């Protein structure tokens, strides 16, 4: 054994130290990353029925731990009115055989006094705790199901019926739900169930009534003419207005007994006719041109600016994107720097550890909610939690627009795309361009069809002049900018080292399969192309028909957390016969797999294999497909690389020493 005294440190030369340091740096930079794999593990066929209920779509499956036993279940609704709680089999079948899901418990929706010739089906469902609980108490979820006849049913985690309430509507024909969502929260002693939706009859859309939130104006009408025209509108009788198809109606139910606590139907909270002088002097006259535009007590959303910004980002692409959640709304417009913005670029953050998670969760739990926020197809609505009275709302001007405070300057930004067929952008904006605007000014634009370079326009690819109208446009995804991005090149270029770059990234997907990410100030983060292009498979003239038929192909993007304890750092992309998982940090294609069908809805993410990684469920026209996400640690390749490098370094040092000794002898 060699003692420390026998070591001759004088024989260690500077070049030896440099070689070792370079070797360690090379190991760190070129270490093998983890490898992810999407593997199909189960398939569940969807029963097909005939009848008018086919105009409604089934709710997407829910992956949730119902009884707090640490094992996630899959809650599925069927066309024949059944609710099933299913679990993934633990036995490994191997080979190409996909196992069937195990039915843990099942129930059928009970129909009382059915007089019509159609059978209601589930149109939405959700789970939640209806009782406040201590930190370590178990939470037994309640399953809330809403059917196509406006019946609300509550089940416990064993699918025992707790209560059933039917909302009385003046309609003798089956209703078609354009969008609907449900929320279950612990409020008071009994909890609160909130249901909101927008319906129409199955024959035709009814004419919009005076309570509609949209204003149709001729291009050359002046403000005074619009105001005078709006004053001629008469207020409808509430009984007649109750059939308005475009109104988003909301109902709140007692969580223990199912009694209606409050409701917001067409005609409720209708305001008196606004005086013309007050109308023209409003903060934003365009939003006040219709005297019935505002409800009683409703104010402009800028009065609650900071509270409103916390409810963003907003993105709507599919009826399943309609959602309700509780929040706290207080008046105020003073902008304060967020925690993320206060973090300096040299802050040390270990991987897979959120230094602020416990503190943020604690502060979020202590917040006293006083409002219900609705994200629907038309925009954002905010209602009082105790009465349903509207507080404020934000209506989006057109489809495929996402809302968010991109650069965190305290203003609502619009993130959208411009294609050849749209005439609502100036002629100077080229086709196939990402457009991010705030108020009346454009923050930045960027091409999303041509190949871009991190070094700017000099190395950009040629412009795609043949990309005309985009079939099935996908709304952009707005996501928090990852705190650290990999790649020494990006750091040498100065990316993500300034506090001003803290904000949100905007991610765009086009029909060629190209995915592009821009930073808060328009800088290019990354660009990648995934498989499954639908550019030559879906014609632009089929767009309106495809939007109406919810069972047609639907490309989608969904940000997810790879692990349950992480932030959203990846993006699931469902395209034509393909599904891909892309890193939001650097655009790396983490995993992909082919599909035997075309996805017809956004993917559902959750850990149904209970291994800590996020799995995904893809809906086809006749089945659900479950894909598990498996991770293979890159330690083995790193060890091989280290051993090989050590041998190479040892040989190089040996040869260098021999060469120097020969030179010294000569």
Image: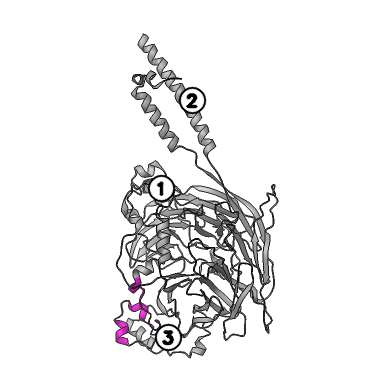
Picture coordinates of residue 368, whole percent (x, y): 41, 70
- N-term-proximal mark, 2 vs 1: 1
**Few, some or many residues within 10 Å of mark 1 (<14, 14–19, 20+):** some
Q: Quadrant of the C terminus?
A: top left
Camera-nearest residue between 171 and 424: 171
In this rendering, does residue 64 appear at all?
no
For the record, the magenta segment spans: 276-304
Residue 173 appears left or right of 479: right
Q: Which residue is identified by label 3?
A: 270
Picture coordinates of residue 560, whole percent (x, y): 50, 56
Using the numbered discs, state the Cα–Cα distance from disc 2 to disc 1 in whole angstroms. 32 Å
Q: Quadrant of residue 632?
A: top right
Confirm or deny contact between disc 1 and disc 3 (CB under 8 A): no
Magenta stretch encompasses residue 195: no
Q: Is residue 387 above or below residue 600?
A: below
Picture coordinates of residue 519, whole percent (x, y): 38, 54
Q: Which residue is identified by label 2?
A: 647
Q: Callout 2: helix, strand or loop?
A: helix
Q: Which residue is identified by label 1?
A: 485
Using the numbered discs, state the Cα–Cα distance from disc 3 to disc 2 in whole angstroms. 81 Å
**Furthest residue in direction top, as rendered:** 666
- N-term-proximal mark, 3 vs 2: 3
| Circle 2 or circle 1, nearest the eye | 2
**Few, some or many residues within 10 Å of mark 3 (<14, 14–19, 20+):** some
């Amino acid at each position: 054994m060699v003692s420390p005294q026998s070591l001759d440190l004088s024989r260690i030369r500077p070049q030896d130290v440099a070689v070792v340091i370079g070797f360690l740096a090379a190991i760190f930079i070129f270490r093998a990353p983890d490898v992810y794999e999407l593997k199909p593990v189960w398939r569940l066929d969807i029963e097909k029925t005939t009848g008018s209920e086919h105009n409604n779509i089934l709710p997407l499956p829910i992956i949730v731990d119902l009884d707090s036993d640490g094992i996630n279940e899959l809650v599925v609704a069927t066309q024949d009115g059944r609710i099933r709680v299913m679990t993934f089999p633990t036995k490994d079948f191997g080979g190409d055989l996909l196992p069937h899901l195990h039915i843990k418990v099942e129930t059928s929706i009970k129909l009382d006094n059915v007089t019509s010739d159609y059978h209601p089906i589930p149109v939405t469902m959700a789970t939640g705790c209806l009782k406040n609980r201590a930190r370590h108490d178990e939470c037994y979820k309640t399953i809330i199901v809403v059917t196509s006849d406006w019946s609300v049913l509550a089940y416990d985690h064993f699918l025992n019926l707790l209560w059933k309430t039917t909302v009385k509507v003046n309609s003798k024909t089956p209703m078609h739900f354009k969008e609907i969502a449900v929320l279950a929260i612990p409020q008071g002693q009994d909890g609160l169930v909130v249901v909101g939706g927008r319906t129409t009859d199955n024959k035709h859309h009814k004419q919009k009534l005076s309570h509609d939130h949209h204003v149709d104006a001729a291009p050359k009408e002046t403000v005074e003419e619009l105001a005078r025209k709006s004053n001629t509108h008469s207020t409808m009788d509430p009984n007649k207005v109750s059939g308005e198809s475009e109104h988003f109606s909301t109902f709140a139910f007692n969580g223990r007994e199912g009694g209606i606590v409050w409701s917001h139907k067409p005609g409720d909270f209708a305001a008196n006719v606004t005086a013309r002088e007050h109308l023209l002097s409003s903060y934003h006259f365009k939003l006040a041109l219709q005297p019935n535009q505002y409800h009683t007590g409703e104010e402009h959303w800028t009065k609650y600016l900071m509270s409103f910004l916390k409810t963003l980002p907003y993105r709507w692409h599919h009826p399943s994107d309609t959602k309700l959640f509780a929040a706290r709304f207080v008046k105020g417009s003073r902008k304060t720097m967020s925690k993320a913005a206060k973090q300096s670029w040299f802050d040390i953050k270990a991987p897979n550890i959120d230094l602020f998670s416990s503190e943020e969760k604690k502060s979020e739990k202590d917040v006293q909610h006083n409002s219900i926020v609705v994200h629907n197809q038309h925009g954002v609505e905010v209602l009082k939690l105790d009465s349903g009275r509207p507080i404020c709302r934000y209506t989006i001007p057109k489809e495929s627009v996402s809302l968010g405070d991109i650069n965190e300057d305290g203003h609502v930004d619009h993130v959208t795309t411009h294609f050849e067929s749209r005439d609502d952008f100036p002629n100077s904006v080229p086709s196939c361009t990402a457009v991010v605007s705030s108020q009346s000014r454009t923050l930045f634009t960027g091409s999303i069809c041509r190949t871009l370079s991190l070094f700017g326009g000099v190395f950009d690819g040629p412009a795609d002049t043949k990309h005309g109208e985009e079939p099935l446009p996908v709304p952009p995804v707005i996501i928090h900018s990852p705190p650290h991005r990999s790649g020494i090149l990006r750091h040498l270029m100065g990316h993500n080292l300034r506090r001003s770059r803290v904000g949100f990234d905007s991610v765009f997907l086009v029909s060629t399969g190209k995915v592009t990410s821009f930073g808060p100030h328009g800088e290019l983060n990354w660009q990648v192309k995934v498989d499954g292009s639908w550019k030559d498979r879906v014609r632009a003239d089929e767009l309106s028909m495809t939007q109406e038929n919810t069972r047609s192909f639907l490309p989608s993007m969904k940000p997810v957390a790879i692990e349950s304890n992480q932030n959203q750092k990846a993006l699931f992309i469902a395209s034509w016969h393909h599904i891909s998982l892309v890193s939001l940090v650097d655009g790396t294609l983490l995993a992909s797999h082919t599909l035997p069908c075309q996805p017809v809805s956004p993917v559902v993410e959750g850990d149904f294999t209970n291994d800590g990684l996020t799995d995904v469920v893809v809906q086809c026209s006749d089945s659900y497909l479950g894909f598990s996400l498996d991770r293979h640690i890159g330690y083995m390749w790193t060890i091989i690389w280290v051993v090989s490098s050590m041998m190479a370094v040892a040989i190089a040092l040996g040869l260098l020493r021999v060469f120097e000794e020969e030179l010294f002898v000569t």
